[in-house]
Amino acid sequence: MIKPSFWESETYLQEADYLIIGSGIVGLSTAIQLKESHPSSRVVILERGSMPSGASTRNAGFACFGSLSELIADLKEESEDAVLAVVEKRWSGLKRLRERVGDEVLEYKEWGGYELFEAKDAQLYETCKEQLEYFNEKLAAITGRQETYRIADDKLNTFQFQGVRQLIWNSAEGQIHTGKMMVALETQARALGVVLVNGVEVTSYEAGSSCVYVYGKGGFEIKAAKVALCSNGFARELLPELKVRPARNQVLITKPILGLPFKGTFHYNEGYVYFRNVGNRVLLGGYRDMAAEEETTAKFGLTEKIQTALKDFLETVILPGRVIEIEQWWSGIMGIGVSKDPIVKALGPRVYAGVRLGGMGVAIGSLVGEELAALMLGS
Ligand SMILES: Cc1cc2nc3c(=O)[nH]c(=O)nc-3n(C[C@H](O)[C@H](O)[C@H](O)COP(=O)(O)OP(=O)(O)OC[C@H]3O[C@@H](n4cnc5c(N)ncnc54)[C@H](O)[C@@H]3O)c2cc1C
């Protein structure tokens, strides 16, 4: 880092009241909430990328709170109350995001989400069918709909998927434009006076008696009264004891497809594979389960194994018999753990964490930010 000027020391590098590491949806939501609660406080975000560089700008943009088979699987691990509490959190988190950013800016479309079942999923489909009414009753109090889930086999002819025997529709699922969400949050944060410093990779911090000293690559230094770690899948790089591990996801998007026969969001293979329309393109990602060990990495990258599987699924199941051109490939890094619950807590005096958002960050990121800000403000 070049030696800072007097002006930089007086502004960007001045001691912060609240310093946030990571400018994903959680970091930005936390900063916005802190500024809204305490407008005169000095809130600084340090982000190592030139843009947010984790999951928030690289995800699939599903505004979802759980497919039926996901909730059934969760019920095997957790109590009914715990499972419904997560659904409630995802539902109200989405509501909060939509209020904050606005449906028009988000390009929010409530076209619903579908779960695909092939012949090999017959048993799972029967279980889902048996439990459909039960979940509809439970979810009515959350979504306000009598029929959140519905058998949608009548769509099979329209969608033309190959080998798909049944579909279950979640009428309350939506989709957003992930990039526009993040630009809007960043714009809001800056408008409130949050100082966003890009290109700073935090390498360590040291909590003193009256402040925290934060150090970055190349000799960067700043002091803050309180610090929040919002680096999700990368959190263990700074704090190895945190129970969060990285999970890479690979994604493709096609070129526009004439007469694309479906719109909405789609879940397959227990949610490990997901696709949606983006206008008349298809975005498809997943198959992390095919190479679980290899994909437990915080390194961006693409592998032939997963790219081949995704391409094959695109060409044989989603759009059989069509010539499809792929526009772009990318990867993103999620933060996952043994539990689906995010870690939102004080790590010690003056230092906090809001990490491990799994595949639910679009849904719960706003609330995690608010919860984290409340913790920082309260102690
Ligand atoms: C491919 C993919 C598809 C997904 N699809 C969906 C979906 O459809 N719906 C949904 O709800 N969720 C989805 N998710 C999950 C969702 O994107 C995440 O849960 C959410 O974005 C996490 O936000 P975050 O702010 O916690 O973390 P991130 O967005 O990862 O932000 C962390 C930030 O910290 C920065 N950082 C890391 N280390 C440092 C450091 N040392 N110093 C400074 N900065 C640092 C990173 O550069 C990054 O910008 C998906 C994730 C992926 C990867």
Image (cartoon, rainbow, N blue to C red):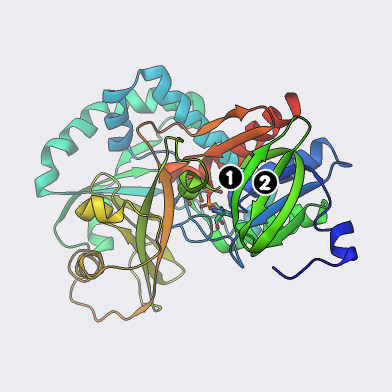
Q: Which mark is residue 20?
A: 2
Q: Which of 344 and 37 is in front in this view?
A: 344
Q: Which residue is drawn at 76% across and 42% down?
A: 224
Q: Residue at x 26, y 24 (%)?
A: 76
For label 1, the residue is 230
Position of residue 183 measured from the top left corner of the image (x, y, whole percent): 65, 62
**2 and 1 marks in contact (CB < 8 Å):** yes
Residue 300 in view (yes/no): yes
Describe residue 263's horizontal placement relative to residue 108 as left or right. Answer: left
Position of residue 311 measured from the top left corner of the image (x, y, whole percent): 24, 70
- Mark 1 crowdedness (10 Å alpha carbons): few <14, some 14-19, many ≥20: many
Q: Nearer the viewer, residue 111 or 117?
A: 117
193 relative to 210, above or below: below
Badge 2 or badge 1: first in the primary sequence: 2
- Mark 2 crowdedness (10 Å alpha carbons): few <14, some 14-19, many ≥20: many
Image quadrant where residue 333 sits: bottom left
Describe residue 269's horizontal placement relative to residue 13 as left or right. Answer: left
Residue 171 in view (yes/no): no
In the image, what residue type sits under mark 2? Ile
In the image, what residue type sits under mark 1? Cys
Describe residue 346's horizontal placement relative to residue 278 as left or right. Answer: right
